[in-house]
Amino acid sequence: MTSLRERVAIVFMTLSAVLTLVLGGAVVHELGTKPSSTVVGAGAGGGSGLSAPGSGGAAPGGPGSSGAVGSASSGSSGGAAAASSGSTSPGGSSGVGTTAAGSLSGASVGVTNSAITVGGIYDETGPFDATVERDTVRAYFDTVNAAGGVNGRKLQLLDCDSGYDPSRAHQCSQQLLGQNILAMVGWLSVSGEEAETQYLSQQGVPVIGGLGVPTEFSSSISWPVTDGLVTYGTAMGDHAKDLGIHAPGIVILNVNFIAPVEQSLVTSLHKNGIKEKSVDQVDATKPDYTDIALKLQSEGVDSVIAALDPFSYSRMLQAFDRQNFHPKLFGLGLDKPSANQQYGSAVYNAQSLTPLLEPADHMSQAGVAAYYGAVRKYFPNQVAALDVYSEGDWVAAEVFVDALRQIGTGAVTRQSLATALNSLKNVDTQGLTEPISYSAGNSHDPNRCFQWIQNKSGTWTTYSGWNCF
Amino acid sequence: MILAVSWGLIPSYTVIGLVLGGVYAMAAIGLVLIFRVSGVLNFAHGAVAMFATFVAYQVSILWGLPGWIGLIAAMLAGSGIGLVIETGTMRPLTGRPPLTKVVVTIGWLLGLQTLAGLVWGANAYHRPVQLVSRSGFRVPLVHVVVGYDQLTTFVVALVLALATAALLRFTTLGTAMRAVADSPATARLWGINVNRVTAASWMAGSAMAAIAGVLITPLISFDTYSLTLIVIDAFTAALIGRLSSLPLTVLGGIGLGLAQTYPRAFISSAGVSELVTFILVLATLGLLFRPGSSRVRLA
Amino acid sequence: MTGDRLRRAVVALLVVVAVAAPAATSDYVRALSADAMWSGLLVLSMVVLTGFVGQISFCQYSFAAIGAFTVGSLVSGHHWSFWLAMPLGVAFAGLVGVLVGIPALRLSGLFLAILTVAVALFFDNYLLAPGTWNSFSGGLSPWQPGRPAFLGLGLSGEYAFYLFSLAVFLVCTLLVWDLRTGKVGRVLRAIRGSELAASTMGLNLTAWKLTAFGLSAAIAGLAGALSAVRIGSVSAPSYDFVHSISLAAVAIVMGAGSVGSAAAGGVFLVFGRYVLQQLSISSQYFNLIVGAGLVLQLVLTPQGLIPSMTQRLSTRFARRTDGLAAPVPAEGVNA
């Protein structure tokens, strides 16, 4: 005997079930069509036609456009500040259109009489450990603070762990903004930099330094200090010819900004008459590379061009070693000392490139000595983990402080910081890079130069000057 | 998405699958022993293995002592944790439903994983303890090289299974364990110290987890979660072994390893091995645990 | 004042505080408060499952992910309205919940727990992994849905969105409480008491159990949909297995049989981490505290913190052990 309430419930449930089925069909159909929104971070077309699916993932699918901040539109995004998708132009420039920046605050955010607070998002837990980047920035700040700070103000870095999760990176942005940071300085979040650069720009927060993801080169208030990863692609494709590479297999990490990087690498290889055998995108958590080794062996590659994180290289080299597969290796970010302990002899004769001076054979150089000295003094157990990314963040901290000194005794605000950064010309980073200059404009790309390095029986040595692209 | 694979790669993938299967089998043996004797499905089994491996890491990598000392330290740590879990948190819950005890092990999983992350860093940047050399030999007729460390894992898994089976059948302690597994009340009537036997099973099972952890980590990623989550593959292997038969557990582990590896030869999509695992879990749960079957009694 | 009237007064007071307090805090704390609301909904979904049918689930975040990704992909990728995508997400989650419930009918509590673990890992490693279903999971990039407007009022402001989340949370809590104390609750308690007896009384166990699973998953899906627009970024690692474990632990510690623990659990999950952060303690300690707390609680106070507390309080006043925070023994776990 069903009561009235139960009858209502049954009718309601039946109606919902029917509606669900109908709308569910519509949803599945809709999901099958390409999303009409703009693409975050991936160049137009995503370069997906070029990548043969490797183990670990297919080409990135359709991400979403940024929700328009502050708009009261009902649910649909794509407000005025959304990034427009640009086509990847040949020549290596970043393939994303510019992000419209929010207005910069003229108030003293994150600045008190005694302290200046900046923030950084780092992948501290998960497959990566970016605490060394965080500690490098802190070491620089500690050095400056020990000498009295900047105009009597001590520098402070607030960090937040994004844990290789883009959504956590976004929450970190919200948290750091809630903690009133002046700017984002010297961050390293592989998962979050791409999307958060756009978000922070829309919020009017200056971003200094970072990994070199494409969106950092398309915002008027982002000041990267090293080469963009897209430029890496161009450079590597070019240098591959000099290394005598003819039939490479490409192995890259499937991060959310990899598409334009892959595209620039492949385009550059083709321009140099090199046709790659295959492109494999792998997950950062991939534990065993035996299948990659077998695949590359069966394809008959003579070399491997790779863009992985330091410890993925370790697992890849282990698998190669075990299968007695020793192709020429040309990879970015291969010179991390703590990772090299794991590579063993498998990395001998490998080739790499660096956008900053290689510390291994320049230990007595002034800039390197200052950098290593500071980290050794304040964070001694991070010294073995120093790598090209932490060196980049050291330079970012330097650039930030130079801009602060430029402001002098004036009010320190986001606006004055941006103006000061744009006025920096030929900043001498103590020789760690070519001199850095910025100017006001839609984007900044100060450093397009690399030095080639090579592993000789366990030691990384530089064998060229600056090659600029 | 479907690779045009040369069928010549199949034997290579078989070897890869067998190695993976050995890993799962080794992880499952201690689990089955603990379950048989104490009736608790230890969700924290992988976490204990992970923690013990980090102890080995501390001893052998950070302090530079030889690898075998690290292994012994790991086994001591593992059995110590097993003892604490049993006496401290299982024994006070005697008489409560099995699900309660399982939830306690979940708490241990969380705690151990986080503690390891706090002490040694919750990232993948650790150098594993390489007890056996990574170099290997080329398996005749196929293209794949099997590392001595991979072979050792496989062989040790078989040896541990046999040893445990022998322990249960031929020793006094083993007989006592089987008695407690059948009925703790009756065992008590026979004068068996049920508490001590249960604790022994936890210690032995956790020590085996420690061995598994130290041998497995060079083959996978050495971080706080990979080994912790291997427990679900171990469960699947154990379920195939009906949670009681050690030989079947080993076979189940090997079967799972092969089932996860073969699809990767044909389909390049990354998650396909996970799909296979899920289907196998459903199948084993569905087929082996029908209501009315004696297994349901245990829970 | 009778215990019941006191309880109602306390609840009313708490609601007033909940509405008014965040007005005096920063935007960030308001955002966290909204997080506490959908976290509370997740705990509520566990209460439905544990309190009604005595089962534990370790895949609630996977159901939340269904809601979150439906909203993310439709609102952000295809410009649908949130008000259409959200109910769909809830319905899908409920449907999947029922699907998971089907094998659960034949499995006892222990093996159901294993099944839910397998479901959670299946979602993590296959369904939401890049490459499998990129148009749903977004592949490697997060979905970034924007905030909707509710009856003309924009919900982009943190306080406005918080009030909306609070309203949703209160409505759901009321619904669950009403079910608990009404006929449905009695039916389900009968089932939990003795399935054999219940079935001899002519109760359709299958339908009731599946409904409980579906409802639990639907509430979790709703929580996911809310989280998607609160955070504004949807990616798979935020809904993974470890989150589900942590949620289950907090729900059990608070008392998974009691509806009042939903609010407490939600607040604890969000502000526990916030407090650690304010004290400059790594937020990694949070899971350690939760794990240790779970172990200690199960060994020491089986019913859960909230029911024990309210029981102790209500022994001071007149007793009526039915209602909001009454501990209904969840036989599967806390007996």
Image: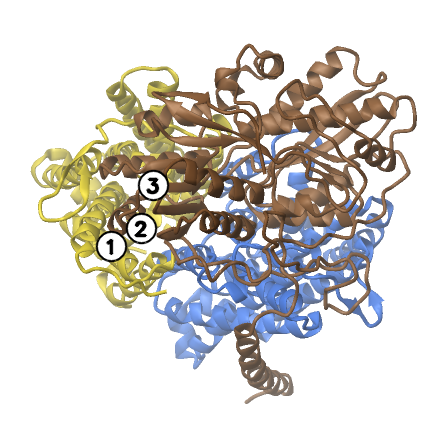
Chain colours: A brown, B yellow, C blue
Q: Disc 1 is attached to a residue of which chain?
A: B
> Where residue A184 sits in the image (x, y, percent)?
72, 36
Q: From the viewer's perspective, tell me whether residue C120 is left or right of residue A199.
A: left
- The chain under label 3 reads A
Tell me if label 1 and label 3 are in contact, CB under 8 Å: no
Discs 2, 3 touching: Cβ within 8 Å: no
Residue annotated with mark 1:
B256
The residue located at (9%, 39%) in the rendering is: B166
Dot 3: within a 10 Å radius of its alpha carbon, few (fewer than 14), some, or many (20 or more) residues? many
Local packing at callout 2 (Cα closer than 10 Å; few below 14, some 14-19, many 20+) is many
Instruction: Point out residue B75 in the picture as x, y percentages from the top left corner.
Output: 28, 27
Mark 1–mark 2 distance (CA, rounded to whole Å): 8 Å
The amino acid pointed to by label 2 is Asp
Question: What amino acid is at disc 3?
Answer: Ser
Q: Chain of mark 2?
A: B
Outermost residue toward the left in this view: B170
* Percent x, y of residue B58: 38, 21
Dividing the picture into quadrants, the one containing residue A5 is bottom right
Which mark identifies residue A303?
A: 3
Q: Earlier in the sequence, mark 1 or mark 2?
A: 2
